[in-house]
Image (tube, grey):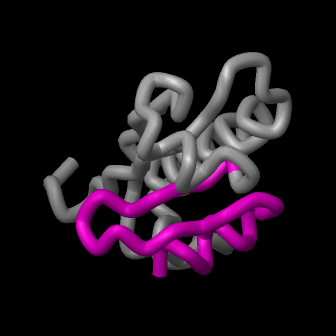
Amino acid sequence: MLDTDLVKLVLYTGPNCSLCDLAFDIVEQFNALQTKATSESTFQLSPSRSQFEHVELETINIRDSADLYHLYAVRIPVLKKADDESELGWPFTLEDLIEFLQ
């Protein structure tokens, strides 16, 4: 896999955040969809049509930083692209994630 096939996202979370668990699961679903599409050699026909084959996810607990807590306390979970810092706030679906990654 080339580096251009990888997108790095940050997932801002909090302790005991069930919505954050759901957001994490959506990212995992995306990765599973992309892995399956790639292994079947139908990537170009994949319903995701994302330019990325895989998401590398870093989770950050907002309670570890006062600044992050003030920015995201009422918004978590939030996904943020590492390259351009655009954000996808909850609620979002797998389809929303795919669109976000276009």
Q: Position of residue 71 (x, y in %)?
A: 54, 55
Which span of residues is magenta-colored? Answer: 76-102
Task: Check if residue 95 falls in the magenta segment.
Answer: yes
Residue drawn 71% across the image and 44% down it: 23
Residue 86 vertical position relative to residue 41 in the rendered view, above or below: below
Nearer to us in this view, 50 or 19:
19
Residue 90 vertical position relative to residue 51 in the rendered view, above or below: above
Nearer to us in this view, 1 or 78:
78
Task: Check if residue 101 falls in the magenta segment.
Answer: yes
Residue 84, image quadrant: bottom left
In the image as oriented, which residue stretches furthest toward the left? 3
Q: Position of residue 21 (x, y in %)?
A: 75, 30
Left or right, 75 with respect to 79, comes to right
Residue drawn 32% across the image and 51% down it: 8
Left or right, 84 with respect to 25, comes to left
Residue 97 vertical position relative to residue 24 in the rendered view, above or below: below
Residue 17, image quadrant: top right
